């Protein structure tokens, strides 16, 4: 019996196994609308046996996209395209999920393969916003624009946009909603003292810096049905002197749990150029922090970061570090990662893959 392949039920949703596709920007949308690329990319991983497929960071407003190629849920054209992708994911027995967010002061960037620096306003880029008017890397050699500091009215408007995107996510038949609260994007940038220099009720001490995230979660939870799981991705450590610690994030997880959040997706880094990157060889350190947060906050966790091997993923579940594992780069390289893991762990693979393929496995 494999723990990794034991189904998990949270609220009214059952995941056929504990393997999820981590959200991965594809930088391939036009005007925030998913297309055939997204359907094939996400659909292949659903038919590859994953229990959960989380669509990439999806902007609540056009200026919240990391790059001009990122997806959105701020209009109904985007909703309809996502619904078509989700019909296929669900038909393959996987749960379709989506990560909604706003990129804050890291928005308006070029695609990674075009260098990733900020795009100038009017040259593909747009004005950016943040908790404070401090650029991501004021001394950088590449262009990093200075965001406009959000007013309290801007904050309320932003929370309304998260609510509108959550309603569209529901209408598009996503069954798990994740709020992006990590990697230095808007909600994380309010929470971390590395970025937030405000002295009003949205800045200064931990509770005030958490206010933006918690109010957004409250507003979203009110429209995201009680019977469907809600996840929040946190950077559970800033990995930088003066930044958020795991203890700060355990406190945040307790606040989130009180608000009806079902999972904390435990990522890390990304707030400043000095903070360890959210993708890197040392992201493995996050895995044990997922276990610590799970034990101390008493909430389901998703563990992510350098998970590549079936035995490693199995151990994370057996040892109680996490309730689900997420893979990004491993899934990019092998859409059939879950099928191969089932084979390695001696699990009946046919239950996890399409009959068109399973029939021929003896
Ligand atoms: C191409 C790519 C795109 C990514 N896009 C997102 C994203 O949209 N949202 C997010 O929270 N993390 C994103 N990440 C981070 C991954 O979800 C994951 O946390 C990270 O890559 C570590 O997992 P891994 O070691 O399995 O790759 C991305 C990573 C990659 C490689």
Image (cartoon, rainbow, N blue to C red):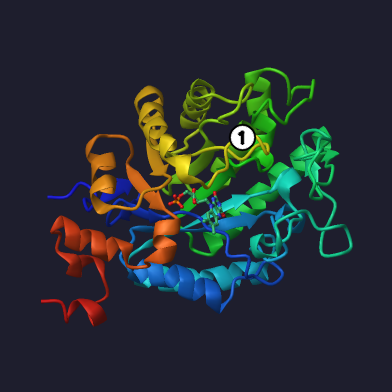
In front here: 161 or 47? Answer: 47
Q: How many numbered circles does the render carry?
A: 1
Residue 190 higher or lower than 77, as above or below: above
Q: In this view, does 43 lie to the left or right of 259?
A: left
Q: Residue at x 69, y 32 (%)?
A: 190
In front here: 305 or 297? Answer: 305
Quadrant for the C terminus, please. bottom left
In front here: 133 or 260? Answer: 133
Residue 204 occupies which quadrant of the picture?
top right
Q: Is residue 259 left or right of residue 263?
A: right
Q: Which residue is drawn at 40% across and 42% down?
A: 302
Residue 312 higher or lower than 208, as above or below: below
- Tag 1's secondary structure? loop
Mark 1, other Cα within 10 Å: few <14 / some 14–19 / many ≥20: some
Residue 315 x/y as whole percent: 24, 41
Can residue 224 be seen here?
Answer: no
Residue 342 occupies which quadrant of the picture?
bottom left
Which residue is the extreme one toward the right?
Answer: 122
Residue 43 x/y as whole percent: 43, 71
Q: In this view, does 153 lie to the left or right of 230?
A: right
User: Does the beta carbon of the residue at mark 1 sit less than 8 Å from ligand 1?
Assistant: no
Residue 153 higher or lower than 167, as above or below: above
In front here: 349 or 158? Answer: 349
Can residue 29 be seen here?
Answer: yes
Q: Which residue is drawn at 38% across and 27% down?
A: 292
Residue 273 x/y as whole percent: 68, 39
Which residue position is annotated with label 1?
A: 275
Which residue is the extreme one toward the top?
Answer: 205
Residue 339 occupies which quadrant of the picture?
bottom left
Residue 164 x/y as whole percent: 66, 53
């Amino acid at each position: 019996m494999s723990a990794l392949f034991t189904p998990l039920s949270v609220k009214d949703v059952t995941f056929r196994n504990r393997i999820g596709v981590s959200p991965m920007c594809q930088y391939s949308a036009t005007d925030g609308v998913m297309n055939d690329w997204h359907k094939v990319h996400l659909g292949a991983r659903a038919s590859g046996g994953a229990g959960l497929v989380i669509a990439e960071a999806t902007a609540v407003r056009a200026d919240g996209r990391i790059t001009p190629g990122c997806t959105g849920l701020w209009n109904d054209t985007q909703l309809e395209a996502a619904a078509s992708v989700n019909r296929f994911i669900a038909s393959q027995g996987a749960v379709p999920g989506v990560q909604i967010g706003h990129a804050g002061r890291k928005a308006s960037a070029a695609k990674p393969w075009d260098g990733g620096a900020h795009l100038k306003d009017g040259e593909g880029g747009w004005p950016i916003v943040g908790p404070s008017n401090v650029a991501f890397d004021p001394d950088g050699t590449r262009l990093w624009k200075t965001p406009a500091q959000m007013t309290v009215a801007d904050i309320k408007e932003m929370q309304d946009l998260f609510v509108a995107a959550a309603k569209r996510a529901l209408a598009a038949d996503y069954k798990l909603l994740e709020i992006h609260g990590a990697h230095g994007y808007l909600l994380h940038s309010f929470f971390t003292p590395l970025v937030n220099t405000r002295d009003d009720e949205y800045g200064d001490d931990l509770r005030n810096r958490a206010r933006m995230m918690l109010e957004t979660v409250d507003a979203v939870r009110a429209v995201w049905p009680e019977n469907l799981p809600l996840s929040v991705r946190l950077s559970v450590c800033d990995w930088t002197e003066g930044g958020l610690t795991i203890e700060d994030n355990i406190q945040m997880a307790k606040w989130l749990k009180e608000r009806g959040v079902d999972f904390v997706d435990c990522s890390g880094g990304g707030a400043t150029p000095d903070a360890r990157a959210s993708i890197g060889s040392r992201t493995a350190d996050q895995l044990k922090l997922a276990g610590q947060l799970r034990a101390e906050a008493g909430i389901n966790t998703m563990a992510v970061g350098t998970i590549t091997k079936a035995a490693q993923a199995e151990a994370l579940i057996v040892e109680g570090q996490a309730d689900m594992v997420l893979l990004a780069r491993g899934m990019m390289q092998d859409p059939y990662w879950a099928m191969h893991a089932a084979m390695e762990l001696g699990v009946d693979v046919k239950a996890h893959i399409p009959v068109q393929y399973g029939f021929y496995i003896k």
